[in-house]
Image (tube, rainbow, N blue to C red):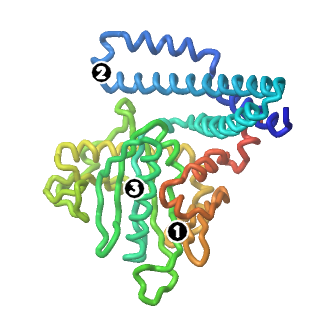
Amino acid sequence: MRAETQTTIEAVRKSLSLLAQRLDYATAPHRLEEFNARVEDPTLWNDPAHAQKLMRERQVLVDAMASYEGIRQDLADNVELIEMGETEGDAEIVADAEAALTALKARAAEKELEALLNGEADGNDTFLEINAGAGGTESCDWANMLARMYVRWAEKKGYKVELQSESAGEEVGIKSASYKITGPNAYGWLKSESGVHRLVRISPYDSAAKRHTSFSSVWVYPVVDDNIEIDVQDKDIRIDTYRSSGAGGQHVNTTDSAVRITHFPTGIVVTSSEKSQHQNRDICMKALKSRLYQMELDRRNAAINEAHDNKGDAGWGNQIRSYVLQPYQMVKDLRTRHETSDTSGVLDGDLDAFMAATLAMDVSGKSRAEANLED
């Protein structure tokens, strides 16, 4: 067996080892039996919110077990095929199995990264907010490009995307937009996207064809489960209704049902402009509780926030990533140093490599390998 093939096999085995560790594979079948017993309880759906949470936790376990077993079985099958092909002198079988192992290595590495999504809220759905920075038309257009990028990313993941609110730019693009993104580990994947994103390009709105720099901010926070107690007192909030405004289309209406909730102690403002005022109040309260929960998560991780704040100003905030379209093409993350020249792919939603690089980076600055040695 070729040395390169041996290296690939060892890489898959290492990923399997981490997956088994994160899954606590020895106890997984027993935990699944417990889930199944609880699911069969006829009183389970007396509390729909609890039932849905239980079903989701069960599905996460089922998927993790199936993923681990699938990778392990595919590894064994392809190793056997290579050994058989070498014994029989069939180079085609060997080549096919080696190609399958290479693909399996990538798949195992992706699942290994997903296994690192073990934070308190990583498995939750998420809210994503985008706000244009200073710069008028340019920043509004950039905010719209970011919104499309994240929607495309979510669609590729098979996630459900719901537009919560949108404020149109005066000429083009958007001043702000808020989305709810629903799917496994949505918050865990997207949480690293919070920060200021910088665009450098020749402006299509400048007749002199000058290079412009634009900034827009992205804010990601988890959807809070109903069983998490977040105390919001009536005296601390103001609820306003207003006529929504936007660029038009199926997601934007112009009734007086839009709702804005202002939280006085923190200054947090959340909005929703669906068709039902009652629905908008419910969405806004959930979004507010999620923001407050995110603040608590930030407080617990003060060291992370301090490191982020020390990265310096870029425009009106701390930039995490630069998207350069002219004079050359490059997208570079300033935290992990991961970069690519495929700007079109990134703006079309190919963000996994950037998210993976951040996941693999320990908050203290250690590499993933160093962090694993300390586990």
Please name the residue shown 22% across and 55% down the image: 250
Specify the label residue 47 is tagged with: 2
Q: Nearer the viewer, residue 348 or 206?
A: 348
In what quadrant of the picture does the C terminus appear? top right
Amino acid on which disc 1 is placed: Arg
Instruction: Choose top left, top right, bottom left or bottom right for residue 231.
Output: top left
In what quadrant of the picture does the N terminus appear? top right
Q: Nearer the viewer, residue 272 or 269?
A: 272
The residue identified by callout 3 is 129
Q: Position of residue 214 (x, y in %)?
A: 48, 73
Q: Is residue 136 above or below residue 128?
A: below
Q: Position of residue 146 (x, y in %)?
A: 44, 61
Tag 1 and tag 3, C-beta contact below 8 Å? no
Amino acid on which disc 3 is placed: Glu
Dot 2 falls on a residue whose secondary structure is loop
The residue identified by callout 1 is 198
Specify the label residue 122 is tagged with: none
- The label nearer to you, 1 versus 2, is 1
- Label 3 vs 2, first from the N-terminus: 2
- Label 1 vs 3, first from the N-terminus: 3
